Amino acid sequence: MSSDVQTATGGTSQPDMPLDPGGGGLRARLGPLMRWESGLVVLLLATVLMGSQLSSMFLESGNFFYIGINVGEFAIMALPLMLIVVTGEIDLSVTSQLELSGVVMGYLFAHGWPIAAAMVVAVCLGAVTGAFNGFLVTRLGLPSMIVTIGTLTLYEGIAQVILPNTAVGGFPAGLTKIGLVPIPHTEIPYSIGFFIIFAVITAVVLHKTPLGRSIYAIGTNREAAFFSGVHVKRIKMGLFITSGILSAFCGVLWSLRFASARYDMATGLELNVVVIVFFAGTAFSGGKGSVIGVVLAAAIFAGVQNALTLDLVPAQNQNIVIGSLLIASVLIPSVADVYRRTGQRLQDLARRRL
Amino acid sequence: MTDGDTHPDDPTGSYQGAAPQREGGQSVGDVQTVAADGASASGLGSQEPVLVLEHASKSFGALRALQDVSLSLYAGEVQGLVGENGAGKSTLVKILAGAYRFESGHLFLDGEEKVFETTAQSRAAGIAIIFQEPLLFPDLSVAENIFMCRQPLRSGRRVDVRRMRREALALFESLGVTLSPDRLAEGLSIADQQLVEIVKAVAADARVMVMDEPTAALTATEVERLFKIVNMLRDKGTAVLFISHRMDEVFALCQRITVLRDGRLIVTKPMAEMDEASVIQAMVGRDLGTLFPERTASTGDVVLKVEHLTSLGAFTDISFEVRSGEIVALAGLAGAGRSEVVRSIFGIDRRDAGRVEVNGRELPSGVPSAAMEAGIGFVPEDRRQQGVLMNLSIERNIALPSLSQVAAHHLVPRGSEKRFAADWVSRLRLKYGRMNHPVATLSGGNQQKVVLAKWLARHPSLLIVDEPTHGIDIGTKAEVHRLLAELAAQGVAILMISSEMPEVLGMADRIVVLFEGRISGVFSREEVDQEVLMRAASGLANRAAS
């Protein structure tokens, strides 16, 4: 899949024009190695190495479950968020959509609904909250950053009205066990299993379909994409709805996993999703991003967090690491750019001396 | 690139005669040899040039934008720089501006070698660039724009607003400009914005002024005013490098002319030794033949039928037809509503009243994809913002409107876009490095070819082209005209907007003239000349034969 990602961001290396003098070949061949995703692979290996140094438990087979369980929902929500960022928008309300969905499921279940029906309603509600975001952004033309900060508070507020100050629990044990045991015969937590499925679907859609091409086109130049017949508003609307549905799905997973639902169960955690999306190499200005990047970023994020926990670093100090990761994700590409330009300058100088 | 490379397209090596090759030409004394380029013949030989560029080369990946180009510029001369799109003019300008660094070569200002790392250094050295579309700060006043970063200060490092205003007024007066220094830059016409840039350059004591196609977006009177100012600057001893696609302007304004082709210097000569034909010959390296292709229209069924189309505040009650094989021009002055009409036909803007029918089927209002499905292709006016996606690759740009055809079973197979685009790229003779390079690496004319390719690939039954040759060099222009003629011969209906009267008269079978949002005349090619069109476009001749 990695080579599909290359074409997506413009880094393939097949020579196809006689105009090309041989000299450019080496750099073109090295191109893929210099890519952000390649850096993530190295960082992932470093994370594994660090984890095994910090704690002897890190590499034990049973630990894989604990590495995965804490990041599954964030990783799932990072997929549609990455697509939204590629189109040049953002959705910061993912965790409050998660909370609202969990709370509605809990409320309905507590009022005697069968759990399956409560789950379906909760997920459908995600489509509604996502559509509301999409409506404000695409139909009224409001900036998505502000809109979704607003709905972040709004949806959590609604959740609080439904279930003020109490947690609802008592979900069937057959379902809550997803927080305790992996998928049978594997070490994979259920949420990671869902993530793998969604990641494959997202990868095919983004890198292999006309829709994916349109998503990149919107992020590159919205106006020119519209002039080329791309359904800009419809696609953005669809992505916000998808984000709502998957966030709500995560709300169901989350509530079952913790065997309880509260209006503030994920407050502030939207930043984890944002960190994964930008650490994946997604460009804030749009037009650039890949699924493999999200997968790698989520793995690194999970590994670092787990290693720190095993090393008994308290949660608030882990925030320092997460914040640093987010800054690094925007800092490193720009530093690399400066580095490249400096190298170019030195080459120029050397050539002048000759 | 290495010295002594011979270019495959230039077997004559004529450029070498104009700028003799020298190894290790490092010393300032070399400027003597540059005087052989005709500077003495135009009365400039006695002085040292202000600016000397020697053996400059620059490439972008595989594309050699500039190869071994030498140029000298004297105080008190206006030198024309011409060449087709992609000849390297813009690269040269950006090197002088400090935006690009050349890979090899030397730049001397007043005999002193300069290396610009930033645009600020170029500006500080006395080089000012006037762009086709100036970049002013819209929320600041004209005076504040002129003194941006060099504001006169009072005690306490506060900006001396009064002095700034006074100095701006004095500068305006010295150049004969009537413009209020207090008004905001927002809403200034392009011509006035250029004036502000020029005054800004004068205020900064620029000795070298580079004008990159300053007249492309100006009206005739604005061009005249600009020329007056350029001549005034020349008389004051400024060295001006003037880039333009319009031959008559270059001949009217310049003392010497430099021609670039394919990144190489072809010739630098006094204006008096060149005529229009020899300049064009040097630019394209081949004969262009007749300017517009011969064609005999054989029109078929009605493809586009527009009835009573109205958009409040833009145009009213527009009705016309375009038949298969026919080229219809929408003529009129800027602001007459031509672009708005075609935007509304293609569905970019919604219409308030009226019908648009393509091949007998009515189009919904405001849905470009429906217009595309019905068989319309649309080459918009603003190529950079609307025509192409600059940072997307050539192949993806061309395939974008055709993704459903490229896709097999809802998936886009690897390499399918490249295969899809390759055919059109070679048919339109696109000059490019690689298919997966971003369109931004191409010259303006080649970018326009990408826009044409992406619509032609859909085999449209109606092609709408809005200013198809705007800002394009003569060679590419002729290619575009030939292409449009070919398409019409194949039965494509073509609706063309053009502000160039010769283009309208040379290409169109019928001409629909708009004036203030209404049709002021419909003419067939035979019954019309430039004067009749101008009268209709100015609202003078009402309702001629239709």
Image (cartoon, grey):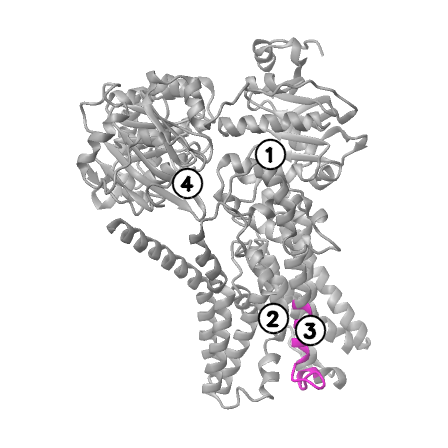
Mark 1 or mark 4, which is nearer the start of the sequence? Answer: 4
Q: Which residue is mark 1?
A: B380
| Amino acid type, callout 2 | Ala
Question: Marks 1/2: CA distance?
Answer: 41 Å
Residues packed near mark 1 inside 10 Å, few (<14), some (14 to 19) or many (20 plus): many
Q: Which residue is mark 3?
A: A194
Pinpoint the chain carrying mark 4.
B
Indicate which label's residue lies in the foreground, 1 or 2: 1
Quadrant for the N terminus of chain A in the image: bottom right
The lab-note entry on whether marks 3 and 2 share a chain reads yes
Q: Is residue B182 visible?
A: no
Pinpoint the chain carrying mark 3.
A
Q: What span is in magenta?
A: A178-199
Question: Marks 4/1: CA distance?
Answer: 27 Å
Instruction: Tell me where residue A97 sits by quadrant.
Output: bottom right
Is A208 rendered above or below residue B210?
A: below
- Closest to the observer: A12 or B344? A12
Q: Which residue is mark 2?
A: A75
Residues packed near mark 4 inside 10 Å, few (<14), some (14 to 19) or many (20 plus): many
Q: Which residue is mark 4?
A: B65
